[in-house]
Amino acid sequence: SYVLTQPPSVSVAPGQTARLTCGGNNIGSKSVHWYQQRPGQAPVLVVYDDSDRPSGIPERFSGSNFGNTATLTISRVEAGDEADYYCQVWDRSSDLVVFGGGTKLTVL
Amino acid sequence: QMQLQESGPGLVKPSQTLSLTCTVSGGSVTSGSHYWSWIRQPAGKGLEWIGRVFFSGSTDYNPSLKSRVTISVDTSQNQFSLKLRSVTAADTAVYYCARCERNLWVFDIWGQGTLVAVSS
């Protein structure tokens, strides 16, 4: 089955740029979505189809997807961005939804 | 604006059946552009997709749970439901219902989640 690999944790200072990665075999051929989950809350979609943002999501959130790595970039990080972030794809070959294990973003 | 709301017992005994319902408001489950899914998250762990249902009633399930899961839709009530049989403590989790856009397989609207504990 298809596997998505995310680093367990990333730390960044306020105002800096956070880059969260999601690795998968030829993930660049898939459509990648990113979710933010604050403690005790449901996940919220922040980037879909590699690099599109839902309405209401700040432009500070952006995404890219090439080769074997998709990346969620958060510019000018704020304390409120501290959360778990999950990547997700649909694996056509198995017709399954796959989530990465999640990355905990800590704002120092 | 569409909202999803999970409901059901917060405590289920081992070997029994977990039953949850998701009520959709501000929109219709008969949308031909969306699937309706269940996703769960054990405490401190990641997200696990359980399965999906289309308004027609067609379903797909995660193979790891397929033998124990049934997801159904009730268009007259604008709801969809989850049944998970023969539960164990490993099924203790927060259960989310979510709307999934068919073309991109993206979960764009989520319920707030409901904690279900399996314990005697």
Image (tube, rainbow, N blue to C red):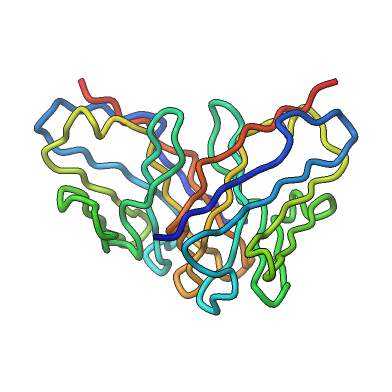
Quarter of the N terminus of chain A within the rendering: bottom right
Seen in the image, is A16 located left or right of residue A18?
Answer: left
Res. B84 visible in picture: yes
**Residue A35 rendering spot, x and y as whole percentages:** 39, 47
Name which residue lies at 74% across and 59% down: B71
**Residue A28 rendering spot, x and y as whole percentages:** 37, 64
Seen in the image, is A27 located left or right of residue A92?
Answer: left
Snapshot quadrant of residue B11: top right
Snapshot quadrant of residue A56: bottom left
Snapshot quadrant of residue A77: top left
Between residues B70 and B6, which one lies in front from this camera angle? B6
**Residue A60 rendering spot, x and y as whole percentages:** 15, 48
Name which residue lies at 55% across and 40% down: B113
Res. A25 visible in picture: no
Between residues B23 and B68, which one lies in front from this camera angle? B23
Name which residue lies at 11% across and 38% down: A76
Name which residue lies at 90% across and 34% down: B15
A95 shown above or below A88: below
Between residues B7 and B94, which one lies in front from this camera angle? B7
Between residues A18 and B29, which one lies in front from this camera angle? B29
Quarter of the C terminus of chain A within the rendering: top left
B111 shown above or below A79: below
**Residue A25 rendering spot, x and y as whole percentages:** 46, 58
Seen in the image, is B88 located left or right of residue B116?
Answer: right
